[in-house]
Image (tube, helix red, strand yellow):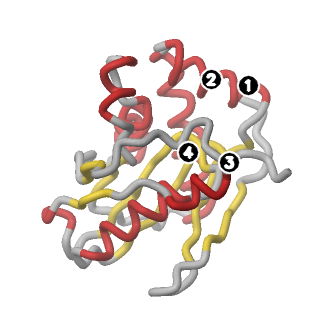
Amino acid sequence: MFTRKSALIAQIPDKATLPFYVSAAAVFEGDVRTAVISLKYRNQRQFAKPLAQLVADAILRERAMNYDFDYVTWAPTTTQHLRQRGMDHAELIAREVGKQLGIPVKNLLRRMTHETQTHRSRQQRLIGPTFRAHSLAAGRKVLVVDDVVTTGATLHGVRRAFRSIGVELVECWAVAATPSR
């Protein structure tokens, strides 16, 4: 369904640990951008499966079938967006990724800040949201799925929350990364 450009990897420094990487299956443009926007803003849920397929295929390529995650989870959207949209688009994608990879999907995060990242400046985005991780994840290997990575601040916040409770591995994947400017 999608014309695939090579996977992108964004590196965001984490002073407390080793460098933090977010992998993206595609560039946020063309058909991928249209599909993400259609799912996220137009409630066209049929796009969750092909977007998840992009992520699952990229994980399989990058990890060469070595993906022994205990759980798949997602970076939850704000309460306001959940009410407006009637669904969490990242959850729909994550559930499909879990199904395609045969990995259990669990809601392991609670969003503690409720400001949206949409339409914020780069400086504002870098502050990012904060999350609380569920104790069920402690000592586990977790795959986190999100729709689009711009600065990486959301997934960085997710990783910090998991690391604070002793998660063994946190690997973050987005469907797409915004193109470099």
Closer-to-camera residue (122/65): 122
Q: Is residue 138 above or below residue 177?
A: below
Secondary element under disc 3, as helix, strand or loop, is strand
Residue 160 is marked as none
Answer few, some or many: residues within 10 Å of disc 1's Cα (few below 14, many 20 plus, some between 14 and 19).
some
Residue underneath mark 4: 55
Residue underneath mark 3: 177
Q: Give the CA distance from mark 2 to mark 1.
A: 6 Å
**In the figure, is residue 51 to the left or right of 106?**
right
Residue 31 is marked as 1
Q: Give the CA distance from mark 4 to mark 2.
A: 14 Å
- Identify which amino acid the numbered label 2 is placed on: Ala
Residue underneath mark 2: 35
Instruction: Check contact, mark 3 vs mark 4: CB within 8 A.
Output: no
Identify which residue is drawn at 48% across, 26% down.
48
Q: Nearer the viewer, mark 4 or mark 2?
A: 2
